[in-house]
């Protein structure tokens, strides 16, 4: 069910362009996440990082370049995206197939010590609040004191007027950078469905999504509500460290 290096490279590079439509100033957001992780990992010989909802390895690959001595465990439930990551970014992380938030999901991670950081980008908005809270509570247990949870995502503002303005800021930036000219999510997946090497993986993906209620959707949890859930999970120190439009990097530090 594997894919060739050339095929994986093609679809990962196409994914990178497609994602620029959705994450405002995406590369800067990656850089900010890496800044935070590098800071909390300073002086540690072999930092242990967990990438939640890693997709085809975009964040893991950037963290591996920034922190070459780190051990990165990257998790996702999508077999197609995981295979692209394993092939194109093979050396960046150890990739694990598990469903974030399910009972016992962290048992598959094979962790041998506490985490220095758990990171995510454009992934956790798929989780409903109850699952988010369970996930945050579990991560609070797995992180070492002083470790961080860093979540880069689009968070809707509370109330239509502010939400509309945040969306406007993002839309104008996309127009200036021409990132709105890239193909969208639906077009990427439609094109991938026509790729023979991905056919078996796509079938498996469809079966898994159907078994998990269609793979979820955007649950529109605000940054403020994420912060509340993080505090309920045991993180006393929670704050956004970067924002552009509705794109945020939210950090929670374990005591």
Image (cartoon, rainbow, N blue to C red):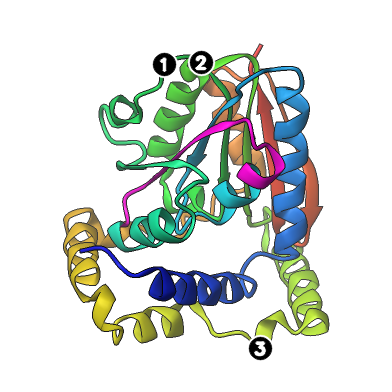
Foreground disc of the pair 1, 3: 1
Distance between the alpha carbons at the discs numbered 2 and 3 = 42 Å
Distance between the alpha carbons at the discs numbered 1 and 3 = 44 Å
Nearest the viewer among 61 and 155 is: 61
Q: Which residues are magenta?
A: 64-78
Is residue 98 covered in magenta? no
Q: Position of residue 104 (x, y in %)?
A: 26, 27
Callouts 1 and 2 close, C-beta under 8 Å: no
Q: Residues within 10 Å of mark 2 (few under 14, many from 20)?
A: some
The residue pinned by badge 1 equals: 112
Is residue 67 covered in magenta? yes
Secondary structure at numbered mark 2: loop
Q: Quadrant of residue 46?
A: top right
Q: Position of residue 220 (x, y in %)?
A: 53, 55
The residue pinned by badge 3 equals: 181
Residue found at x 47% / y 18%: 142
Secondary structure at numbered mark 3: helix
Q: Quadrant of residue 168?
A: bottom right
Residue 47 visible in the current orientation: yes
Quarter of the image with the N terminus is: bottom left
Position above or below: 166 against 171: above
Nearest the viewer among 204 and 244 is: 204
């Amino acid at each position: 069910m594997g894919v060739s290096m050339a095929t994986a490279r093609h679809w990962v590079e196409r994914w990178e362009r497609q994602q620029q439509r959705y994450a405002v100033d995406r590369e800067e957001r990656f850089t900010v996440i890496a800044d935070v992780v590098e800071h909390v990992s300073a002086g540690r010989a072999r930092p242990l990082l967990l990438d939640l909802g890693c997709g085809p390895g975009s964040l893991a690959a950037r963290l591996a370049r920034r922190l070459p001595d780190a051990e990165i465990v990257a998790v996702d439930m999508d077999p197609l995206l995981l295979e692209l990551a394993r092939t194109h970014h093979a050396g960046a992380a150890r990739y694990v197939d598990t469903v974030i938030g399910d009972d016992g999901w962290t048992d598959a991670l094979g962790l041998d010590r506490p985490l220095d950081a758990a990171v995510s980008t454009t992934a956790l908005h798929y989780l409903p609040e109850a699952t988010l809270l369970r996930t945050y509570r579990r991560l609070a247990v797995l992180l070492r004191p002083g470790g961080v949870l860093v979540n880069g995502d689009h968070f809707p503002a509370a109330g239509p007027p502010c939400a509309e303005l945040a969306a406007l800021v993002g839309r104008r930036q996309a127009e200036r950078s021409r990132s709105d000219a890239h193909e969208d999510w639906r077009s990427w997946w439609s094109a991938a469905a026509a790729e023979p090497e991905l056919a078996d993986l796509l079938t498996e993906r469809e079966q898994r999504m159907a078994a998990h209620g269609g793979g979820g959707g955007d649950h529109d949890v605000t940054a403020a509500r994420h912060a509340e859930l993080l505090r309920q999970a045991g993180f006393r120190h929670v704050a956004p460290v970067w924002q552009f439009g509705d794109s945020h990097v939210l950090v929670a530090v374990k005591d």
